[in-house]
Image (tube, coloured by chain):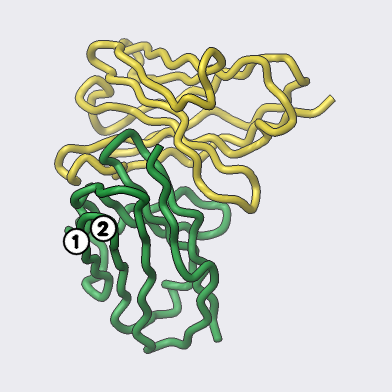
């Protein structure tokens, strides 16, 4: 099974900050990686697919990069609505999620 | 509006089964694969299985071998996930999620979630 490891588990930041979340796969997944945002009591929301493609309707301050085993999600300038938990997911071989990164207000 | 609407919360006793429904609106159910994901309160997301809705083919995570059954009723645009031999560790929110080729085969639309509580 492919394991996904996200870091950090928790991230404290302020509005306007640039933040980066990383995700590492236990084996190469090419670019079969998605990023989701989840708020309490809500379903996950797709932000990025194929590692770097922005889902329709998602603000351009979100971006993704990487291939193989190492990936990043970057938010260029944090907005109040961005404080949430973020998950990466590989879909190269079945599906596995990272453990999540909680983005908190500093 | 494209959406997935799931059935309501369930409370079950250990050893029982639960069947969660997921009704698609705004698109034809059979045009996309459906996946099921669960989330224990305060924890991460766990993929359970998928179904190709036009053929009925299914696949699932090894962890749920022999306990999960995915079906569909195309006449009412609804997919189902049944989990049997429930135990307390199955207490979680269960989501259906559509896999979309136009979103790079990622899960683009999710149901609102169904809380399943397993308690004696």
Q: Crowding at label 2, few (<14), some or many (≥20) Cα neighbours within 10 Å? A: many
The letter of the yellow chain is B
Q: In 3D space, how far apart are the residues under numbered discs 1 and 2 (Cα atoms)?
A: 6 Å
Kindly identify which residue carries mark 1: A52
**Residue B9 to residue B57: above or below:** below
The letter of the green chain is A
Question: What x and y, as percent, mark residue B39?
Answer: 56, 43
For the N terminus of chain A, the image quarter is top left
Question: What x and y, as percent, mark residue B32?
Answer: 23, 28
Check if mark 1's residue and mark 2's residue have beta carbons within 8 Å: yes
Q: Residue at x 49, y 59 (%)?
A: A100
**Residue B22 to residue A37: above or below:** above
User: SS of the residue at dot 1?
Assistant: loop
Q: Are marks 1 and 2 on the same chain?
A: yes
Q: Nearer the viewer, residue A69 or B71?
A: A69
Viewed as shown, does residue A46 lie left or right of B17? left
């Amino acid at each position: 099974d492919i394991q996904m490891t996200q870091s950090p588990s928790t991230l404290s930041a302020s509005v306007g900050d640039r933040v980066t979340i990383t995700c590492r796969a236990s084996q190469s997944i090419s670019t079969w990686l998605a990023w989701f945002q989840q708020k309490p009591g809500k379903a996950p929301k797709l932000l990025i697919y194929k590692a770097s493609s922005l889902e329709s309707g998602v603000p351009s301050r979100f971006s993704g990069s990487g291939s193989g085993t190492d990936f990043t999600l970057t938010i260029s300038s944090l907005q109040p609505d961005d404080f949430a938990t973020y998950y990466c997911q590989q879909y190269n071989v079945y599906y596995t999620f990272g453990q999540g990164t909680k983005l908190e207000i500093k | 509006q494209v959406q997935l609407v799931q059935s309501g919360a369930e409370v079950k006793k250990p050893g029982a089964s639960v069947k969660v429904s997921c009704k698609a609106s705004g698109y034809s159910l059979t045009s996309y694969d459906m996946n099921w994901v669960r989330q224990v309160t305060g924890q991460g997301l766990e993929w359970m299985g998928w179904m190709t809705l036009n053929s009925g083919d299914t696949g699932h995570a090894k962890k749920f071998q022999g306990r999960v059954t995915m079906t569909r009723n195309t006449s009412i645009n609804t997919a189902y996930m049944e989990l049997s031999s429930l135990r307390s560790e199955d207490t979680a929110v269960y989501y259906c999620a559509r896999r979309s080729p136009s979103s790079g085969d990622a899960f683009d639309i999710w149901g609102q979630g169904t809380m399943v509580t397993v308690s004696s």
